[in-house]
Image (cartoon, grey):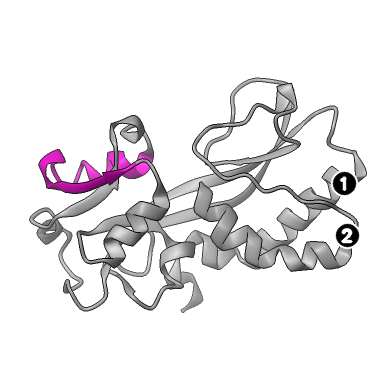
Amino acid sequence: MTCLVSDYLVPRAGSLRSAQPRLALELIGGNRNLRLGRREADLAIRLARPAEGPLVTTKLADCGFAVYALRGTVDPGDPVLWGAKDWVGYDDRLLHVPEMQWLLGIATERQLMIRSNGLRAVVQAVASGLGLGILPCFLADSRPDLQRLSGPEPVLTRELWLLTHAEMRDVPRIRAVSDWLLTIVKEDAACLSGDLSASD
């Protein structure tokens, strides 16, 4: 998830730089899963727990998703009414992801007026008033131009997992980044989960 890197990790990287000023950090966001076994990355964050490989997996957080629209353009309320609206979603290569499976339970493919393979484009389309979208709460709740329509609880939750190659887990630089990630997601658990009812 590119936005997890650019909109969540990068703004918080100052604390890691302060603690580890000589550590060079390379953050790569994208839809392609880099292979830790081939040393394409030292650490990876994924929205699903891998089922194989010599990897150490640690659950970071629950990541909530909710339905959003451009603020002031749609009245929150009955989800049945959402089926009559235009929607923004992912293209055919990402039909398998839980967000799209949920969306296609509400709307038809004909109502998907804008499709993209990137979350940033989907967010921008929703913010431009081109349709409703199911977006990560940590990203959309912080934007004043977006309005959550689906209530205080997320409509969908996915797990964020931290992956490390078993042989590399105790390398000091990798341990430092792992510890930092675990610290910031613990501090931001409510923001990431998107469960506003928990704060009541």
The three-letter code of the residue at mark 2 reads: Gln
Task: Give how far across and how far down residue 3 sits, in percent.
Answer: 51, 54
Task: Give how far across and how far down residue 69 sits, in percent.
Answer: 26, 66
Which class describes the residues within 10 Å of circle 2: few (<14), some (14-19), or many (20+)?
some
Quadrant in which residue 42 is drawn: top right
User: Residue beneath label 2, please?
Assistant: 20
Q: Which residues are magenta?
A: 98-116
- Is residue 111 highlighted in magenta? yes
Residue plotted at (80% across, 53% down): 179
| SS label for mark 1 | helix
Disc 2 to disc 1: CB gap under 8 Å = yes
Residue plotted at (49% across, 63% down): 138
Q: Nearer the viewer, residue 6 or 183?
A: 6
User: Residue beneath label 1, please?
Assistant: 173
For residue 66, say whether it is visible: no
Vertical side of 181 occupied by 93: above or below: above
